[in-house]
Amino acid sequence: MKFLCVECDRQMQFEERQLPGDGTLAAAFRCPACGRTVALLTNPMETQLVASLGVKIGGTTIEPQPMETVRGMVTTGRDDAFDDGKGETGTGKSPRPAWSPEAQERLARVPNFVRGMVKRIYLDYAKERGIAEITPAIMDTARTELGLEEM
């Protein structure tokens, strides 16, 4: 993907990238001829999608690191998107529901770029109902009650 300046018909050059910390991504591009700028803002879902594809906006100034792509996917978006669901300690919050092995296997089949969102839906559903362990049966019930059968 390239951004072109409408006035000059020149390719815009990358100028700046920001990760505000809320799962969004902001990037600015500038026309080298006339100086016009354009900004790109992605929502958390788009940011996760781009990261899962291994796309780097703005490049990098250091040599590639081992497992860089995997680390990038895990740390992009919500901080808790890939939590193991074993609960939180010392936060004053109630522990998260546990995941049965069968439910974990089922969750692993969900595409990576939406897995965090799907996991959050089931965790919220279980917490609201006081369910201690998420099983495939709980997942089926949640899908029916939340109207997600077509997903």
Image (cartoon, rainbow, N blue to C red):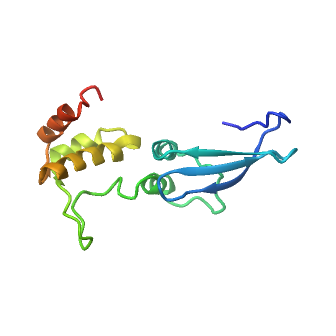
- Give left or right: position of 41 versus 150: right
Residue 122: x and y, percent? Answer: 23, 45
Q: Residue at x 13, y 49 (%)?
A: 129
Residue furthest to the bottom: 90
Residue furthest to the top: 150
In the rendered image, which quarter contains the C terminus? top left
Callout count: 0
Q: Residue at x 41, y 42 (%)?
A: 113
- Give left or right: position of 36 versus 141: right
Q: Residue at x 16, y 44 (%)?
A: 102
Residue furthest to the front: 128
In the rendered image, which quarter contains the N terminus? top right
70 over 143 or under it: above or below: below
Residue 137: x and y, percent? Answer: 11, 38
Image-quadrant location for residue 60 = bottom right
Q: Residue at x 64, y 50 (%)?
A: 27
Image-quadrant location for residue 112 = top left
Between 65 and 50, the one lying in front of the other is 50
- Give left or right: position of 6 versus 142: right
Residue 25: x and y, percent? Answer: 56, 51
